[in-house]
Amino acid sequence: MKIHQDIAIEDLVREYPKSVGFLMEKGIRCLACGEPMWGTLKSAAEEKGFTAEQIHTLVEELEKRMQDV
């Protein structure tokens, strides 16, 4: 599964469980009570004030990190 800004947080966490730690490093909470949050990676990042450029960089970094795992 390809990681992109419109991926659902639930799908991201299910396919790439280690993405949770990466997102937490970036200040993006993607779990609540052990369950994935609703919404997309983009919407979660926007809630934290990320710009479109920062979201693009976040996706690239996340893709690279998940390939290295």
Image (cartoon, grey):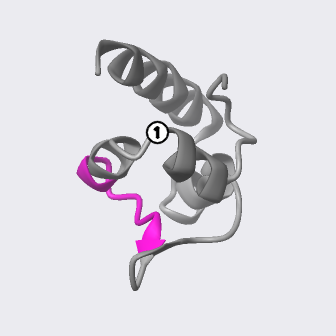
Residue at point 69%, 54% (across, down): 40
Of 7 and 57, nearer the camera is 7
In the rendered view, tell whether residue 69 sits above or below residue 24. above
Of 39 and 11, nearer the camera is 11
In screen coordinates, is 26 left or right of 11?
A: left
Q: Amino acid at mark 1?
A: Tyr
10 Å crowding of disc 1: few (<14), some (14-19), many (20+) = some
Question: Residue 25 in the image: x percent, y percent?
Answer: 24, 49
Residue at point 58%, 41% (across, down): 51
For the C terminus, the quadrant is: top left
Residue at point 67%, 57% (across, down): 43
Badge 1 element = loop
In the rendered view, tell whether residue 32 sits above or below residue 24. below
| Segment tinted magenta in the rendering | 24-31
Extreme residue in the right direction: 6
Extreme residue in the front direction: 14
For the N terminus, the quadrant is: top right
Q: Main secondary structure of the magenta part?
A: loop
Q: Quadrant of residue 62?
A: top left
In the rendered view, tell whether residue 52 sits above or below residue 37. above
Is 44 colored magenta in this rendering? no
Question: Residue 44 in the image: x percent, y percent?
Answer: 58, 59
* Count of picture labels: 1
Residue at point 40%, 14% (across, down): 67
Question: Residue 34 in the image: x percent, y percent?
Answer: 39, 77
In the rendered view, tell whether residue 3 sits above or below residue 43. above
Q: Quadrant of residue 39?
A: bottom right
Residue topped by disc 1: 16
